[in-house]
């Protein structure tokens, strides 16, 4: 699916859905998981990428090309 370092496919999907404007609960519904699962995955990714906060996480994702490699069908579940 992607060649983004130190991120799972699910984490990339979460980042793309958050970037599209969905909140944690909406992302969770799309992925059929709990909203705490989304929060935990975001938190773990922030630790791995050594960023503080969601804005910095989004900026790092942009640097890594998370949003430019997006599949047009990615947001439809």
Image: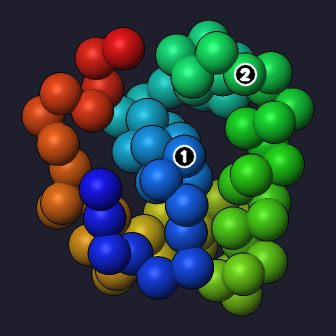
Instruction: Pinpoint residue 61: horizontal percent, then vertical percent.
Output: 42, 70
Q: Residue at 47% of width from left, 82% of height from top?
A: 5
Q: Name the foreground residue: 4 vs 39.
A: 4
Alpha carbon separation for disc pair 1 and 2: 11 Å
Q: Residue at 57% of width from left, 22% of height from top?
A: 31
Q: Which mark is residue 35?
A: none
Q: Residue at 27% of width from left, 32% of height from top?
A: 74
Determine the residue located farthest toward the bottom in the rendered image: 50
Determine the residue located farthest toward the front in the rendered image: 1
Instruction: Kindly indicate the quadrant of the structure image that contains residue 69.
Output: bottom left
- Using residue 46 as the reference point, say whether residue 37 is left or right of it: right
Q: Which of marks 1 and 2 is nearer the N terminus?
A: 1
Q: What element carries label 2?
A: loop
| Mark 1 burial class by Cα count in 10 Å: few <14, some 14-19, many 20+ | few
Q: In which quarter of the image is the C terminus?
A: top left
Q: Residue 33 carries which label?
A: 2
Q: Residue at 48% of width from left, 53% of height from top?
A: 9
Q: Name the foreground residue: 76 vs 54.
A: 76
**Label 1–label 2 contact, CB within 8 A:** no
Q: Name the foreground residue: 35 vs 54.
A: 35
| Mark 2 burial class by Cα count in 10 Å: few <14, some 14-19, many 20+ | few
Instruction: Report whether residue 55 is seen.
Output: no
Instruction: Kindly indicate the quadrant of the structure image that contains residue 3.
Output: bottom left
Instruction: Pinpoint residue 73: horizontal percent, then vertical percent.
Output: 18, 27
Q: Identify whether 4 is placed above or below 21.
A: below
Q: Residue 10 carries which label?
A: 1
Q: Identify whether 36 is placed above or below 68.
A: above
Colour mapping used in the image: rainbow
Instruction: Pinpoint residue 52: horizontal percent, then vertical percent.
Output: 75, 76
Instruction: Pinpoint residue 46: horizontal percent, then vertical percent.
Output: 71, 71
- Using residue 48 as the reference point, say whether residue 20 is left or right of it: left
């Amino acid at each position: 699916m992607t060649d983004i370092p130190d991120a799972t496919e699910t984490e990339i999907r979460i980042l793309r859905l958050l970037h599209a404007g969905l909140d944690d609960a909406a992302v969770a519904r799309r992925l059929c998981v709990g909203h705490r699962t989304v929060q935990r995955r975001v938190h773990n990714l922030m630790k791995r990428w050594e960023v503080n906060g969601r804005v910095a996480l989004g900026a790092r994702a942009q640097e890594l090309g998370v949003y430019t490699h997006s599949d047009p069908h990615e947001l439809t579940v």
